């Protein structure tokens, strides 16, 4: 008989298309996850995944199984929500999705804060781009998402949390001399480095710098803010940096941070959850915890 554990492991594998990443997502070892997938295949009598050097591909049967597995998991989640005993605020499992340009600067503060104030909480974190997180939220694989607003989705509640101003980051030995405060006309579009497609910060950088219709951009898309700022510190270009990232990134990279002229551009970070989840009290407590943990320079 198939188990919920196997289905959750298979869902994670289908989402990440990588055994190691899937194992990390569900907090087990890679051999343990692989063994459960093999057992699931044996019980179903068919091959669900193809293993190759580039990762994992779903077979035709695997795609069919995934649709049914996701339906079952969503129903189980709704069942748990419906019959969950009132164990208090933020009691039990809370699955939180966070965009990559927020997670490294918020999570180290937020997790200890939640565990101290809500000792019965069980936290599961997932870091991904906004579209992926919202899809997982609507499909019942996440309870809430921390992302940049606005979010266009049905059946969700949105709680704005804080504003995060943008600055320009350059190498300390950068050959360009920019006036401070900075205006978008001073940005050398040819040297602007961006996160890869899918990251909301990429679109925000294009909007702030007025380059949405221009093509003279550095042909490189970094997968993380850390990678991007390492490139900047080695004088490979300049990039937009959120204010909440400045203390961490300037401590490990040799950067010059330049403010924008007023009104300074910013992003609004918010908490998003399903209206139908029945966890408004939990989300209110989580929102309060997040705002308490925002780095002091963000407001």
Image: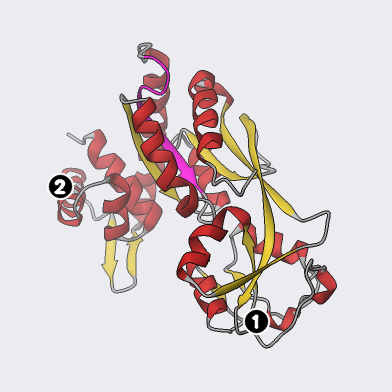
Q: Which numbered disc, 1 or 2, marks the residue closer to the eye? A: 1
Residue nearest the observer in this picture, 118 or 211: 118
Q: Residues within 10 Å of mark 2 (few under 14, many from 20)?
A: some
- Which residue in the structure is indicated by mark 1? 218
The residue at the point 45 percent across, 37 percent down is 142
Outermost residue to the bottom: 175
In the drawing, does residue 276 fall left or right of residue 238?
Answer: left
Within the image, what quadrant is residue 218 found in?
bottom right
The correct choice, above or below, for 141 with respect to 264 in the image is above
Q: Residues within 10 Å of mark 1 (few under 14, many from 20)?
A: some
On residue 258, the disc is none
Residue nearest the observer in this picture, 259 or 123: 259
Within the image, what quadrant is residue 199 found in?
bottom right
Residue nearest the observer in this picture, 190 or 196: 190
The residue at the point 53 percent across, 35 percent down is 292
Q: On the rendered image, what quadrant is the C terminus found in?
A: top right
The span shown in magenta is 88-98
- Dot placed on the residue nearer the N-terminal end, 1 or 2: 2
- Residue 89 in magenta stretch: yes
Total marks placed: 2
Which colour style is shown? secondary structure
The correct choice, above or below, for 234 with respect to 256 in the image is below
Residue nearest the observer in this picture, 55 or 57: 55
The kind of secondary structure element at disc 2 is helix
The kind of secondary structure element at disc 1 is loop
The residue at the point 58 percent across, 84 percent down is 235
On residue 39, the disc is 2
């Amino acid at each position: 008989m198939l188990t919920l554990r196997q289905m959750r492991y298979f869902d994670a594998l289908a989402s990440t298309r990588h055994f190691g990443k899937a194992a990390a997502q569900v907090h087990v070892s890679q051999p343990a996850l692989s063994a459960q997938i093999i057992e699931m295949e044996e019980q179903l009598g068919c091959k669900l995944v193809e293993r190759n050097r580039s990762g994992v591909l779903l077979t035709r049967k695997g795609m069919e199984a995934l649709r049914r597995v996701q339906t079952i998991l969503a129903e189980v989640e709704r069942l748990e929500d419906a019959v969950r005993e009132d164990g208090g605020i933020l009691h039990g499992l809370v699955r939180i999705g966070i965009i990559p340009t927020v997670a490294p600067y918020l999570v180290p503060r937020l997790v200890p804060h939640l565990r101290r104030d809500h000792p019965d909480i069980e936290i599961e974190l997932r870091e991904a781009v906004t579209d992926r997180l919202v899809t997982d939220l609507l499909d019942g694989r996440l309870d809430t998402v921390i992302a940049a607003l606005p979010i266009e989705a049905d059946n969700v509640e949105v709680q704005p949390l804080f504003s995060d101003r943008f600055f320009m980051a350059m190498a300390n030995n950068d050959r360009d001399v920019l006036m401070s405060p900075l205006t978008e006309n001073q940005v050398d579009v040819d040297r602007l480095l961006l996160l890869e497609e899918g990251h909301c910060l990429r679109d925000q950088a294009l909007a702030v710098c007025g380059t949405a219709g221009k093509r003279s951009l550095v042909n490189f898309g970094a997968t993380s803010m850390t990678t991007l700022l390492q490139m900047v510190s080695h004088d490979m270009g300049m990039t937009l940096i959120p204010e909440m990232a400045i203390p961490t990134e300037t401590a490990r990279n040799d950067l010059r941070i330049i403010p924008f002229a007023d009104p300074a551009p910013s992003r609004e970070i918010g908490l998003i959850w399903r209206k139908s989840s029945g966890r408004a009290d939990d989300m209110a407590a989580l929102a309060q915890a997040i705002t308490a943990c925002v780095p002091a320079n963000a407001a």
